[in-house]
Amino acid sequence: MIHVGDVVKTYPLAGGSFTAIDQLDLDIAEGEFVAIVGRSGSGKTTLLNLLAGIDRPSSGTVRVAGADLGSLSESGLAAWRGRSVGLVFQFFQLLPTLTVAENVMLPMDFARTVPGGQRRDRAERLLERVGIAEQADKMPATLSGGQQQRAAIARALANDPPVLLADEPTGNLDSVTADAVLELFGDLNAEGRTIVVVTHERDIRSIVGREVTLKDGRLVTDQAERAMVTV
């Protein structure tokens, strides 16, 4: 489902350049639930942005859900992303002027994967799936943090993407709510969806099937394969 081959990502700086990802190789099979962990500055979010097609590698290959992202134009990437990847962020990124249901419908409006007359019904089903059906017609600001994150997960599922990418999805939640959100990700993975989550959660190993650790843009440990050397 995901292939990262000899990927390097550098950013220009006034004094030279900064290497955020350094010759990284990583393969993730369909249906895996993988946590990307590491200290701040280790390259976790950069890697997630590369997998989402939000950023492009300086060199190397990124293939996700059947597409070579380096070969796609910006418009092609946007169309691919709408169909293939669901994104969940730490600060929810719900549009404040739309209701919760309208936020969930928005990806369907952009990608046109669901007929117009069916989008509201699908949004309501997804909100029921994540446990906040009763919040459908409320504005995001009236919801708790946990409810907003559940709404964001429902939005990420709007076009039924095969891959979910989450960047610190519990970083803005209390521990009880964070556990509930991670349990929801576990349920979605059990249904066959491939999930990659960047997280600082210490108890993530009890939920994910694999934990990959980055340091200075390099993969240093891979819990599932047990073939990497710990630095």
Image: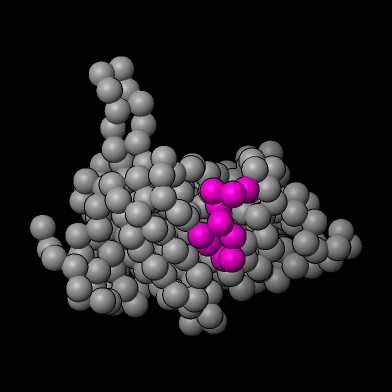
Residue shown at the point (19%, 68%) measured from the top left: 228
**What is the total number of numbered labels drawn onto the structure image?**
0
- Most extreme residue toward the top is 14
Q: Residue 15's quadrant in the figure?
A: top left
Q: Is residue 108 visible?
A: yes
Over which residues does the magenta segment extend?
63-72
Q: Residue at x 44, y 63 (%)?
A: 3
Residue 50: x, y in percent?
46, 49
Residue 88: image location, x then y, percent? 51, 55
Residue 69 in the magenta stretch? The answer is yes
Give the position of the C terminus as an image quadrant.
bottom left
Task: Give the residue at x 32% y 23%.
Answer: 13
Q: Does the magenta portion include 64?
A: yes
- The residue nearer to you, when weighing 202 against 52, is 52
Q: Is residue 222 left or right of residue 112?
A: left
Q: Which one is in front, 213 or 60?
A: 60
Q: Is residue 106 left or right of residue 41?
A: right
Name, please, the residue furthest toward the right.
117
Camera sees residue 139:
no
Q: Is residue 221 left or right of residue 140?
A: left
Whether residue 154 sits left or right of residue 40 in the image: it is: right
x, y percent for residue 158: 67, 62
Residue name at image x 45 percent, y 54 percent: 61
Q: Nearer the viewer, residue 169 or 67?
A: 67
Pinpoint residue 33: horizontal percent, then vertical percent.
41, 72
Instruction: Identify the coloring.
Output: one colour
Q: Is residue 119 above or below residue 145?
A: below
